[in-house]
Image (cartoon, rainbow, N blue to C red):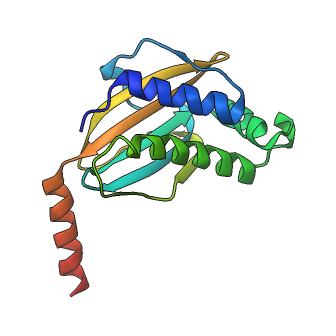
Amino acid sequence: MTVNQEQLVEIAQTVWSSFLGMGLIEMATDKSSATDEGHSASATVHISGSWNGSVILSCNTSLARRAAAAMFEMDDDEVGDSELSDAFGELANIIGGNLKCLLPEPSQLSLPTVSMGAVHVVTVPGAALLEHVELDCDGDQLRIAVWNRRDDQHREHHLELEGLAR
């Protein structure tokens, strides 16, 4: 399965525009800067089935708060942690769902996991970065990364879990 930058940008711009009424502009992307350092909000969904991997959205809390305010038609200062987490998780879910449509069947999308707070780095053990894009929304950066887990590692993980269950 190949996901390219153009597909990620198109999906992100469509989702951001349709659900938030906000624009995203593609920024230059450097594979060596693919870590999420400097971001304090992240949302992750996992895709499993014929293809196994993860989609991670990350940005600063300010952008996540603006996105939540737009989604729930609230003022930025009215957005609490719960709304922020719900909105950012839903954005990851929608973007991940759109990517899932490009994948071979069968596949399933996990519920989103949202992490907020101090600056942190999100990684997917046993996976390799397949593609990522960096986008600008009125001066704030949004990063979307797609990680691909090798099938043999996925099978080994399930075998280890089955062994633990016995």
**Residue 105: image x %, image y %?**
29, 54
* Direction from residue 40 to residue 138 in the image, left or right: right
Farthest residue to the bottom: give it. 166
Determine whether, in the image, residue 127 is placed left or right of residue 134.
left
Quarter holding residue 117:
top right
Residue 56: x, y in percent? Answer: 45, 41
Q: Quadrant of the C terminus?
A: bottom left
Q: Can residue 107 be seen in this view?
A: yes
Question: Is 61 in front, or is 73?
Answer: 73
Report whether residue 122 is seen: no
Q: In this view, does 104 lie to the left or right of 77?
A: left
Residue at point 27%, 43% (across, down): 148
Tell me residue 101's x, y (percent).
40, 44
Q: Tell me: residue 33, above or below residue 58.
A: above
Residue at the location (67% across, 46% down)?
87
Quick check: 141 above or below 58? Answer: above
Q: What percent of the width, then of the height, locates residue 75?
A: 86, 36
Number of numbered discs present? 0
Foreground pick, 164 / 37: 164
Residue located 82% across and 35% down the image = 76
Quarter holding the N terminus is: top left
Horizontally, residue 30 falls left or right of residue 78, namely left
Q: Residue at 36% of width from left, 52% of height from top?
A: 47
